[in-house]
Image (cartoon, helix red, strand yellow):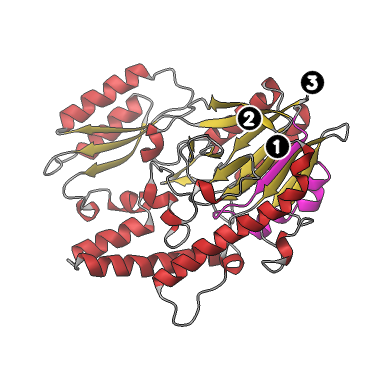
């Protein structure tokens, strides 16, 4: 009988995330502790983390402590092979700093594509990692691709149009995985799982907060289709989209989603990690393991202040035993807010052991006329702010589209510059 191998796929931890003016340290700590219990309970052999370990390139010290505490806790689990790749939020230099020490513990970090596009993707590339059990038996082979940055895809060319650059990026992403597939061919006869990792937007994926999760490359909604991943890969473990989902019909290409909701819009998602069970190279089971909800993020809507108060009180009764106090966003669906409403709602929330983070007036999506303008701007993605500014200038739609493409390019360049590329 062939040996069973269990591989757990997770991503998008975003440790150190600042949620408006508050941090997420309590939820992240509980989520990572829970993840260690899952590795123990399900007798997991291999853990895959597909990018965005941290929320920023320079995470706060408590986030780093949580990360290393988790890695140390792996020694108490049966999981002895761990592969971690960098996402677009991670600083390659920061994540890679302890690489030599961690690899002595079978924790494999892959944060950048080394060397030229050709030399980096041969059979012996560091991106292709054979994973062995304690007895030396081969468990799986992983092509651990990090987020592909500008230097991996090539800088813009003089005179190149936005459409031309979009097409060039798409072709180079496909070529990257085609060459990884070629490198994996040498292991096809091993009869073990052959897995690819990636951090990108795959065509057809659905994000609950699209503006924050799709703007990773120009034109990335057409980046790569599930069918573009070479068939030699028996499973493709993706990160970047925070909603757990399969991109293709047979579930070969899959996002595990984030560990915790990272915005109010993500509260519609059921958070989970993905456990796959293999016998030789054959996938015998795929299981979504739900992540407990440690803190509720809730949006309450009402047409009057009194309606909002009633909904808050009813919500508080249903969740008075939650482990962490809920955080609320309240939306007044009317023409204007009554005087002192925000203070009344804040006082009631505090009395109910909840915290009101934001009160906004939903009226023609004008975030600029709200009492809590600063908090709203902190919650918006830069692209949302730019779109609102274009609309307020009453520009033609065709011109707005061109400006958005240019803005996306600038945003991508700035983000990668800030994250140590």
Q: Quadrant of the N terminus?
A: top right
Residue 277 picture location, percent across and down: 66, 27
For marks 2 and 1 on the same chain, the one whose residue lies earlier in the sequence: 1
Residue occupying the point 43% across, 65% down: 411
Real-space Cα distance between discs 2 and 1? 10 Å
Front disc: 2 or 1: 1
Q: Is residue 95 magenta?
A: yes
Secondary structure under badge 2? strand
- Residue 145, compared with residue 236, is above or below; it is below
The residue at which mark 2 appears reads as: 276
For marks 3 and 2 on the same chain, the one whose residue lies earlier in the sequence: 3
Secondary structure under badge 1? loop
User: Magenta residues, as a range?
Assistant: 79-105
The answer to whether residue 413 is visible is: no
Q: Quadrant of the C terminus?
A: bottom right
Check contact, mark 3 vs mark 2: CB within 8 A.
no
Q: Nearer the viewer, residue 21 or 95?
A: 95
The residue at which mark 3 appears reads as: 1
Q: Which mark is on residue 193?
A: 1
Residue 37 picture location, percent across and down: 66, 24
Q: Residue furthest left?
A: 335
Residue occupying the point 61% across, 36% down: 9
Side of 257 where 330 appears, left or right: left
The answer to whether residue 324 is visible is: yes
Callout 3 environment at 10 Å: few (<14), some (14 to 19), or many (20+)?
A: few
For marks 1 and 3 on the same chain, the one whose residue lies earlier in the sequence: 3
Residue 273 picture location, percent across and down: 56, 32
Check contact, mark 2 vs mark 1: CB within 8 A.
yes
Callout 1 environment at 10 Å: few (<14), some (14 to 19), or many (20+)?
A: many
- Residue 137, compared with residue 114, is above or below; it is above
Q: Which mark is on residue 103?
A: none
């Amino acid at each position: 009988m062939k040996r069973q191998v269990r591989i757990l796929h997770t991503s998008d931890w975003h440790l150190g995330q600042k949620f408006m003016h508050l941090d997420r340290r309590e939820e992240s700590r509980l989520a990572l502790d829970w993840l260690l219990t899952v590795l123990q309970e399900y007798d997991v052999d291999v853990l895959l983390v597909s990018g965005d370990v941290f929320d920023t390139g320079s995470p706060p010290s408590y986030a780093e402590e949580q990360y290393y505490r988790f890695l140390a806790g792996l020694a108490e689990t049966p999981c002895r092979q761990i592969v971690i790749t960098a996402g677009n939020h991670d600083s390659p230099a920061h994540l890679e700093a302890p690489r030599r020490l961690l690899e002595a513990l079978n924790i494999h970090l892959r944060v950048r594509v080394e060397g030229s596009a050709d030399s980096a993707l041969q059979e012996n590339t560091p991106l292709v990692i054979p994973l062995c059990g304690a007895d030396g038996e081969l468990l799986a082979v992983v092509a651990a691709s990090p987020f592909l940055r500008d230097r991996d895809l090539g800088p813009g060319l003089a005179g190149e149009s936005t459409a031309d650059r979009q097409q060039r990026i798409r072709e180079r992403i496909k070529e990257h995985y085609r060459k990884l597939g070629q490198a994996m061919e040498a292991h096809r006869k091993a009869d073990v799982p052959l897995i690819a990792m990636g951090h990108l937007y795959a065509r057809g994926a659905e994000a609950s907060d699209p503006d924050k999760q799709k703007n990773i490359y120009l034109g990335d909604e057409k980046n790569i289709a599930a069918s573009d991943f070479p068939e030699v890969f028996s499973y493709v473990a993706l990160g970047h989209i925070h909603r757990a989902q399969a991109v293709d019909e047979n579930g070969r290409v899959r996002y595990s989603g984030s560990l915790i909701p990272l915005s109010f819009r993500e509260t519609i998602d059921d958070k989970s990690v993905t456990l796959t069970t293999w016998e030789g190279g054959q996938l015998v089971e795929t299981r979504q393991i739900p992540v407990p909800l440690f803190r509720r993020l809730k949006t309450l809507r009402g047409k009057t202040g009194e309606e909002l108060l009633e909904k808050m009180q009813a919500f508080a009764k249903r969740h008075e035993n939650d482990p962490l106090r809920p955080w609320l966003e309240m939306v007044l669906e009317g023409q204007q807010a009554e005087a002192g409403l925000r203070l009344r709602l804040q006082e009631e929330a505090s009395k109910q052991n909840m915290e009101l983070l934001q009160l906004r007036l939903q009226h023609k999506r004008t975030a600029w006329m709200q009492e809590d303008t600063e908090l709203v701007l902190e919650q918006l993605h830069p692209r949302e702010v730019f779109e609102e500014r274009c609309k307020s200038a009453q520009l033609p739609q065709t011109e707005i589209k061109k400006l958005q493409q240019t803005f996306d390019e600038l945003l991508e360049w700035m983000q990668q510059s800030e994250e140590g590329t």
